[in-house]
Image (tube, helix red, strand yellow):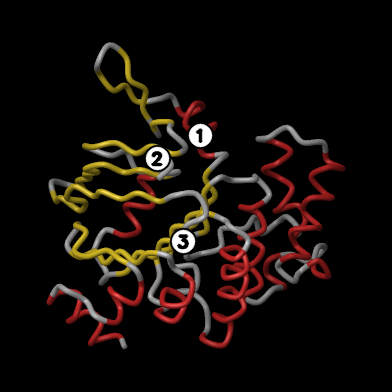
């Protein structure tokens, strides 16, 4: 087996003295889709934010493509990187949030081209060409000149996905990307994510969409109380869970 693209070992995080991540171990190989499931407060979103150093871990280590995230090892000790160095690492880690976080005063096209031009140094013409290709991919090329408030929630989330993809990330993180959407809009976002998975994008997805997890995930990780309770293929974790905590959770939501 090749080295994982994402590897987390004994990741710990505290907030105000409360331990919200209690030693998370997780490996994701290139091309895999891993879904994180669990009740609210399980630590799923916090873990994602630790992967790209939006939250500083209090213990353990995270590597993406073999590079320690947020820290460097010097003389046997870990030293936190400067924000500029962390920003360089984040270029390779796309993240799509619950809320779309689009720039309201910029058009759809400008939202997608901003990062590649300012962060990756692409020419405006090249960034525009790539952005239009990505907007076409998510079914929104015809709305390139629209502003976010002229779009539905599902359309805004698809723009957010295109914006993340424009940075050509090695890894995509999705933090409950459909939770803020009206039910009839959920399918259009899941369709884009399913397409990405079929094309080999490496993805870690926090979700309550059991159908997506069952059909698309290579591995399902069930978390509760800041710890990994159970992990395995969807058929095992969702169809025949070993742990009572997993069974209780699934009984409530299925």
| Residue found at the far front of this picture | 1
Q: Residues within 10 Å of mark 3 (few under 14, many from 20)?
A: many
The quarter of the picture where the C terminus appears is: bottom left
From the top left corner, tell me how far across and down residue 46 is, in percent.
32, 53
240 or 171: nearer the eye?
240
Mark 2 lies on residue: 53
Mark 3 lies on residue: 33
47 or 31: nearer the eye?
31
Q: Give the residue at x 51% y 39%.
A: 90
From this view, report whether residue 80 is shown above or below residue 11.
above
Q: Are marks 1 and 2 in contact (CB under 8 Å)?
A: yes
Q: Nearer the viewer, mark 1 or mark 2?
A: 1
From the top left corner, tell me how far across and down residue 16 is, in percent.
17, 47
Q: Nearer the viewer, mark 1 or mark 3?
A: 3
Mark 1 lies on residue: 89
In the rendered structure, which disc, 1 or 3, sits on the residue that comes first in sequence?
A: 3
Q: Give the residue at x 79% y 50%.
A: 130
Q: Give the Cα separation between the discs numbered 1 and 2.
A: 9 Å
| Residue found at the far right of this picture | 125
From this view, report whether residue 82 is shown above or below residue 33.
above
Q: Nearer the viewer, mark 2 or mark 3?
A: 3
From the top left corner, tell me how far across and down residue 121 is, in percent.
73, 32
The quarter of the picture where the N terminus appears is: top left
Left or right: where 41 falls relative to 33: left
112 or 77: nearer the eye?
77
């Amino acid at each position: 087996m090749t080295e994982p693209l994402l590897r987390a070992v004994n990741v710990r995080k505290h907030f105000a003295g409360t331990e919200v991540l209690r030693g998370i171990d997780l490996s994701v190989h290139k091309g895999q889709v891993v879904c994180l499931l669990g009740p609210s407060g399980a630590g799923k979103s916090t873990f994602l934010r630790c992967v790209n150093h939006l939250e500083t871990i209090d213990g353990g280590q995270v590597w993406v493509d073999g590079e320690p995230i947020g820290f460097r090892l010097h003389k046997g000790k870990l030293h936190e990187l400067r924000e500029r160095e962390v920003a360089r690492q984040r270029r390779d880690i796309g993240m799509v949030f619950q809320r779309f976080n689009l720039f309201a005063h910029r058009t759809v096209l400008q939202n997608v081209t901003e990062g590649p031009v300012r962060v990756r140094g692409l020419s405006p013409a090249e960034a525009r060409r790539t952005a239009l290709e990505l907007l076409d991919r998510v079914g929104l090329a015809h709305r390139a000149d629209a502003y976010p408030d002229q779009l539905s929630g599902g359309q805004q989330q698809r723009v957010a996905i295109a914006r993340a993809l424009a940075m050509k990330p090695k890894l995509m993180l999705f933090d409950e990307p459909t939770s803020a959407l009206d039910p009839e809009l959920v399918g259009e976002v899941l369709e884009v994510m399913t397409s990405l998975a079929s094309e080999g994008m490496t993805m870690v997805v926090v979700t309550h969409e059991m159908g997506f997890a069952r059909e698309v995930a290579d591995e399902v990780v069930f978390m509760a109380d800041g710890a990994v309770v159970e992990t395995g293929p969807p058929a095992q974790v969702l169809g025949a869970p070993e742990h009572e905590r997993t069974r209780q959770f699934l009984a409530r939501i299925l």
